[in-house]
Amino acid sequence: MFNYFLNTLAISVSELEPVQNNNDEKQKAIWIIALVAVVIICIVLSQIKFDISGKIKAKKEENAKKKIERERNEELERLHEIKRKNQRK
């Protein structure tokens, strides 16, 4: 999706008329605005991607901790069960 968006944006920018006359300030301004917009959009999208990947990593770490805690609790329960059986004997 990110690549599709950038390709669409690149096509839109490439459809602008190239500067044919150095005195055409309006066309220069359009090119500058388009280039600045592309840079800003790339920065924003990369930040969003970075934030999402950070959240995914944090979620994976949280799930791993929960799994370890669950396994530890199961092992403790098993040991308590063995201890109860031994006390009955």
Image (spheres, rainbow, N blue to C red):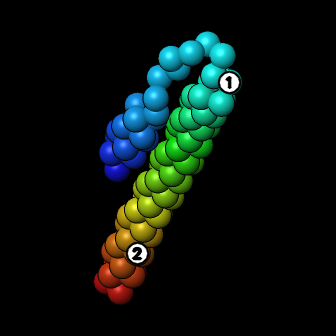
Residue 13 coordinates in the image, percent (x, y):
46, 34
| Quarter of the figure with the C terminus | bottom left
Residue 54 coordinates in the image, percent (x, y):
53, 47
46, 19: nearer the viewer: 19
- Occupied quadrant, residue 28: top right
Give amino acid for label 2: Glu
Please indicate, yes or no, whether residue 70 appears anywhere in the rendered image: yes
Image point (53%, 44%), residue name: 45
Residue picked out by circle 2? 77
Q: Residue 5 carries which label?
A: none
Tag 2's secondary structure? Answer: helix
Furthest toward the top, the residue is 22
Mark 2 Cα shell of 10 Å, populated few (<14), some (14-19), many (≥20): few
Please indicate, yes or no, whether residue 36 appears anywhere in the rendered image: no
Image point (49%, 57%), residue name: 59
Tag 1's secondary structure? Answer: helix
Count of labels shown?
Answer: 2
Side of 18 where 51 appears, left or right? right
Give amino acid for label 1: Glu
26, 47: nearer the viewer: 26
52, 15: nearer the viewer: 15
Does residue 59 sit above or below 13 in this rendering?
below
Does residue 80 sit above or below 35 in this rendering?
below
Does residue 74 sit above or below 5 in this rendering?
below
In front: label 2 or label 1: 1
Does residue 23 sit above or below 27 in this rendering?
above
Image point (33%, 81%), residue name: 85
Image point (59%, 38%), residue name: 37
Residue 6 coordinates in the image, percent (x, y):
40, 39
Residue picked out by circle 1? 25
Side of 87 where 19 appears, left or right? right
